[in-house]
Image (cartoon, helix red, strand yellow):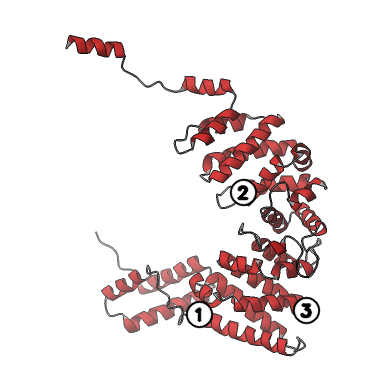
Amino acid sequence: MYNPVRKPKDLARSLVDIAREETDAPIKACSTTVNLILIRLMKVVTSIDELRNIQRAFHSDHLLDWHECFDSKVLGNIIAHVSENIDDKEQHNWTLQDDEDELIELIDKFTSVMVKADERVVLRHLSNFEFLKKLVVLYEVEQRSSVRNAVAKALSAACKLSRKITFEMLCSNLPVILVQTNAFKPPLSKLENSSLRLLQTLYSTNEKPPQSHNGKFKLGRYYFTPDFLERMLELVKTGDQNALLFMVNYNYQFDEDASPVLDILRSHDSLSFGHTLIKHLSKNKNDEDISTLKLIYDIYVAPNNRELISSIFYTNDLQVLAVILSQILLETNVPRKITMILEIFEEIIREEKVSNESIFSSLRTFIKSDSLEESVILKAQSLVPPELLLDELMNEPVEPFDDPLEQSESTEAT
């Protein structure tokens, strides 16, 4: 098959276009980068086979030399400069003046590299947590909100890299500092927005922090007070997703009969919270998110749940919730989620506030699964009215079977 030879200008233009499409970088930067790559290749490649070997090397897990790569050098320089700045300030009791814009630029660059670089390169630099601990100190002591805002964004980016980093930060003084140094009252400032995003991220791992974080901290006060949770509830009413995620994630730390989140919901008008919670569940039906479902489960199985359900959910929202849970039941393979949904269904059916059509339909499909434990199937069957189960059995195709009497007569004739 004949392939027409493309003109050099067309090839060059297509390479730049690929770089532009894949990176969304400015066209001038794409053109310069492609040109530099071609120049480097021209110096070392002498045959098409060598070019193929280079292409195959891209699939190697060890492509980057983390000591020598560009991002590693940039991170090393940033960490050294910012650490020196923090150390100098500590030695001068935080009275030393510095260039605010330069410090923010360095921290923002650090955040940018964490987001864009190979995460293995970044994690090598952060593995001992020392630099992150310095950033926590800087956030606590720094008076300029612009610097603290940059630090909060950097710590959020670091937490998203690794659950280990997130848990290390959760076990530090950082949650206390975030609560004590921010009012978190609407409308939120840029610093408060970044700080609240960081706070909810710290609790997103579904791992429980040290016991002191849920009781009295060493400073002699409760830092997640009812007043603080009330502020979170007010923020949820304004549509703040970070406040919602914090309440969802924080609730995961407690049993349903000891949850301070449920206590706040009981004592306040929370219908807008319930509406927002269901919308969030509908957009996050993946198996990784179990905290949202747990909060709904806790609401349904908590003591005096009927009053609690009425104060949190509109009747129409309950109907939507039944449909969403029916979908999740058929999509998930997580045993704990299945168990929670079945118990929620039991309460919904008992309440008789909404149509159970979607629930019964999903249960009838669910019990046909071959991969479920018998106890789970029996639980699901117990929720479906007998007449619907009987109707299901009547509509199942009947397998043909051999009549034992005919088999006996055939054997005798033989």
The amino acid type, in three-letter code, at marker 1 is: Ser
Q: Considering only order in the chain, which callout, 1 or 2, is on the residue closer to the N terminus? A: 1
Is residue 100 in view from this perspective? yes
Q: Quadrant of the C terminus?
A: top left
- Please name the residue that numbered disc 1 is placed on: 72
Q: Considering only order in the chain, which callout, 3 or 1, is on the residue closer to the N terminus? A: 1
Q: Considering only order in the chain, which callout, 3 or 2, is on the residue closer to the N terminus? A: 3
Query: How far apart are the alpha carbons under marks 2 and 3?
Result: 38 Å
Residue 15 at what x, y percent from top left?
Answer: 42, 70
Residue nearest the viewer, comparing 231 with 257: 257
Residue 192 at what x, y percent from top left?
Answer: 75, 67
Query: How far apart are the alpha carbons under marks 1 and 3?
Result: 30 Å
The amino acid type, in three-letter code, at marker 2 is: Lys
- Please name the residue that numbered disc 3 is placed on: 143
Report if the CB atoms under discs 2 and 1 are less than 8 Å apart: no
- Please name the residue that numbered disc 2 is placed on: 283
